Amino acid sequence: MQRQAKAVVAAQLAYLEACREDLAYATKRWQLLRRYQERRFLRRQIGRRQTAKA
């Protein structure tokens, strides 16, 4: 039981460290472009749903 607990804690620490490294990278232009395109798409979908309900 003690070994399993240590293994879980070690796995959590490794996962959190990987997340920190991932978030530390500067955002690339293509990531921003994709984010903007996703937002635009979702806004259009919401607009279509609202006009369909009216």
Image (cartoon, grey):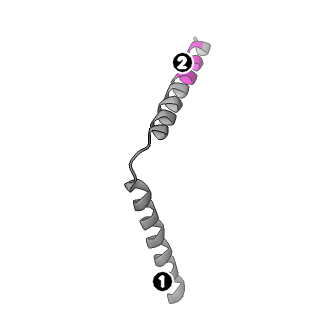
Q: Residue at x 41, y 61 (%)?
A: 21
User: Which residue, given by chain and number where applicable, does mark 2 sit on?
Assistant: 47
Along the line of sight, the residue nearer the viewer: 38 or 6: 38
From the top left corner, tell me how far across and down residue 47 is, in percent.
Answer: 54, 18
Secondary element at tag 2: helix
From the top left corner, tell me how far across and down residue 46 is, in percent.
Answer: 54, 23
- The three-letter amino acid code for the residue at tag 2 is Gly
Q: Judge left or right: residue 17 versus residue 47.
A: left
Q: Is residue 49 above or below residue 12?
A: above
Q: Residue at x 43, y 65 (%)?
A: 16
For the magenta stretch, what is the residue range?
44-51
- The three-letter amino acid code for the residue at tag 1 is Lys
Q: Residue at x 40, y 53 (%)?
A: 25
Q: Is residue 40 above or below residue 16?
A: above
Q: Is residue 6 above or below residue 24?
A: below
Q: Judge left or right: residue 23 versus residue 47.
A: left
Q: Residue 4 occupies which quadrant of the picture?
A: bottom right
Along the line of sight, the residue nearer the viewer: 48 or 25: 25
Magenta segment: does it hold 10? no
Along the line of sight, the residue nearer the viewer: 40 or 52: 40
User: Which residue, given by chain and number where applicable, does mark 1 sit on?
Assistant: 6
Q: Residue furthest bottom?
A: 2
Q: Which mark is residue 14?
A: none
Q: Residues within 10 Å of mark 2 (few under 14, many from 20)?
A: few
Q: Residue at x 44, y 60 (%)?
A: 19
